[in-house]
Amino acid sequence: MGTVYKIVELVGTSDSSWEDAASSAVATAGESLRDLRIATVTELDLQIADDGSVAAYRTKVKLSFKHEGSA
């Protein structure tokens, strides 16, 4: 029997870059999920401040991890 993975979708934020936002999402997920395997970036966007500047970078990622009980 093969291994089974579960996928969750998270949005990380950063005030400096999309890469930092993705790293934040992965690091936070790693605090409560074990056996993280793959992070796939599915969307990048920006939060715009009232003055028109970039307020935050947002990165949406799908994270897969080994399902408990899988071989």
Image (cartoon, rainbow, N blue to C red):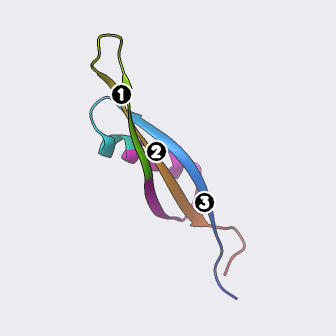
Residue 38 among those drawn in magenta: yes
Residue 30, image x and y in percent? 51, 52
Q: Residue at x 53, y 49 (%)?
A: 29
Residue 37, image x and y in percent? 49, 66
- Please tell me which residue lies in front, 37 or 49: 49
Q: Which residue is drawn at 59% across and 49% down?
A: 32
Label drawn at residue 7: 3
Tell me the kind of residue under disc 1. Ala
Which one is earlier in the sequence, the residue at label 1 or at label 2?
2
Residue 4 among those drawn in magenta: no
Contact? badges 1 and 3 (CB < 8 Å): no
Q: Quadrant of residue 64?
A: bottom right
Q: Element type at marker 1?
A: strand
Tell me the kind of residue under disc 3. Ile
- Please tell me which residue lies in front, 50 or 71: 50
- Which residue is labeled 1 in the image? 56
- Please tell me which residue lies in front, 36 or 15: 15
Span highlighted in magenta in the image: 22-41
- Which residue is labeled 2 in the image? 25
Identify the residue at the far bottom of this view. 1
Q: In which quarter of the image is residue 70?
A: bottom right
Which one is earlier in the sequence, the residue at label 2 or at label 3?
3
Which one is in front in this view, the residue at disc 1 or the one at disc 2? Answer: 1
Q: How far apart are marks 1 and 3 (CA)?
A: 25 Å
